Image (spheres, rainbow, N blue to C red):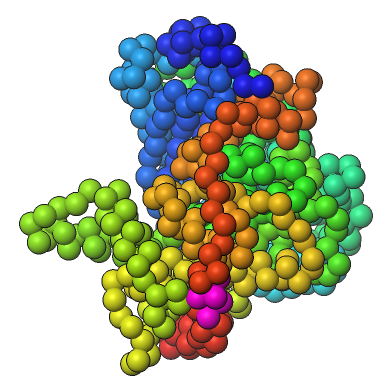
Amino acid sequence: MSPDRAEVRDAREVIVSGGATLGIELGSTRIKACLIGDDPATVIATGSHEWENRFVDRLWTYTEDDIWSGLQAAYADLVADVRERHGVELENVAAIGVSAMMHGYLAFGPEDQLLVPFRTWRNTNTERAAGVLTEQFGTNIPLRWSIAHLYQAVLDHEPHVPDIRFFTTLAGYVHWRLTGRRVLGVGDASGMFPIDVATRDYDASLIERFDALAREEAPGLDLRELLPDVLVAGQPAGELTAEGAALLDPAGRLQAGAVFCPPEGDAGTGMVATSAVAPRTGNVSAGTSIFAMVVLERPLEGVHHELDIVTTPAGDAVAMVHCNNGASELAAWANMFSRFSAAAGAPVESDAVYETLFREALVGDADAGGLLAYNHLAGEPIVGLAEGRPLFVRTPDSRLTLANFIRAQLYGVFGTLALGMRVLDAEGVALDRMLAHGGMFRTAGVAQRFLAGALGAPVAVAETASEGGAWGIAVLAAYVSAAERTDLDGYLRDTVFADAAFDTVEPDAADVAGFNAYLQRYDAGLAVERAAVESL
């Protein structure tokens, strides 16, 4: 059961006593901080900071200063929210969790120095390495996985390779600097290197195979020595050091000593934020990227380039359909409409712009009137694109209306995802429910309805859908103190989501047929997208 409301301390009392739990997530465009109290389902303060990746030397990156100034700004914003809401200063917390976008490559040398700029999941320069590893391992190794970045550096004879002493993900890096521990949660680790679900650790046989493969190009490379240690949800993963507290809060008020949960990736926190960690459950997370996670009952029969095999934060196998491009192009169009309203002398708040556009999409044609929208700002490996070119395409006889235009843009967010999900359908993977979270689901009944049509399956959205990964990692941090009493699924069902309201939308037959027609055009029109990459 969820905590009895009479037994839950007032938020102010929790904060003053140092009993609150802090979750931090570094997303692609925003760093979020979230504070919860005795009831993990209730958020008592939030903070955020917007940031953007940089395209430097044809690689997507964030600088170390970007990371730490952004974290400090998000934390300071949280502290200000605590002060405004509760009238007290935040000086101590009981537990902390760090999450971030998965995959990518942060490599460090013998003096703990960053050897090359952070290479994010968004980079697609690892095609050769990913192809070789997929063939050698007999399991799909996507371009964005950390091991593909490492092996590409080996194949390219990059001068930093002999100096590598440790490499990790963004969440693992931040956690290390705050605690001194070089560890990862199993879910985030599963996006670095394949996991053996029987041991909840890296696949030892594949590590041996990698070392043998890399020996000719990089003699002496010992992969296991370079990887962070793997922990599962509920295990303590270190404490906030005095140096870490000063890094997070240069003002000097935050005290050391908070217990950390294992750092996780945004896929894992998305599963937690939707209570989708048990077999036959799944979730869709929509942001800068969009991905679906389906917890498996059995191994897949084949190797599919559209699917990653990763794990839940507890270590259970998950099929992941990851698309590099999510809602960013949709946001760009919304911003243009927002600017139009301001230029017309009738400015409209950003949330109202989205609400208006989304509601208008509901009156559009089921197939979006023959319009097509490609949201590919970056490369998209699932459809074979090394680079992206956002496109809006229509034929002369298509029906260009605002409703159809926005509906096409929303369908475009789900287009590549739907192609990947068709592969899971062909594998006979069964789902009892699909849950969705992310900012685009804040307008009730629109993106959720279209996603149900795209998947041909019920889609549920919880009240916490827009809280996202910062709340999810805060929940994982709170779980550390409860792990001896229950497993993660039981904790989510019986404590966190016991009183949660889920709004479930069944697929509408007309939406299903309309999206299928759209997807056929979308698939055929990818030739136009490829031509744009070659020509522009």
Left-right relation of 153 to 81: right
| Residue 150 locus on image (x, y percent) | 69, 59
Residue sitting nearer the eye, 356 or 215: 356
Left-right relation of 298 to 363: right
Residue sitting nearer the eye, 61 or 384: 384
Residue 343 lies in quadrant: bottom left
| Residue 1 locus on image (x, y percent) | 66, 22
Q: Of all residues shown, which one is farthest toward the front?
A: 509
The image shows residue 115, relative to residue 518, as above or below, that is: above
The image shows residue 52, relative to residue 216, as above or below, that is: above
Residue 396 lies in quadrant: bottom left
| Residue 232 locus on image (x, y percent) | 76, 35
Q: Any magenta on residue 330?
A: no
Q: Any magenta on residue 514?
A: yes
Residue sitting nearer the eye, 492 or 379: 492
Which quarter of the figure is the C terminus placed in?
A: bottom left
Q: Give the overall secondary structure of the magenta segment.
A: helix
| Residue at point 77%, 47% (across, down) | 279
| Residue 280 locus on image (x, y percent) | 75, 51
User: Can residue 58 be seen in this snapshot?
Assistant: no
| Residue at point 46%, 10% (across, down) | 10
| Residue at point 49%, 59% (across, down) | 449
The image shows residue 233, relative to residue 399, as above or below, that is: above
Left-right relation of 346 to 443: left
Residue 38 lies in quadrant: top right
Q: Tell me where the magenta segment starts and ends, as one range.
A: 512-517
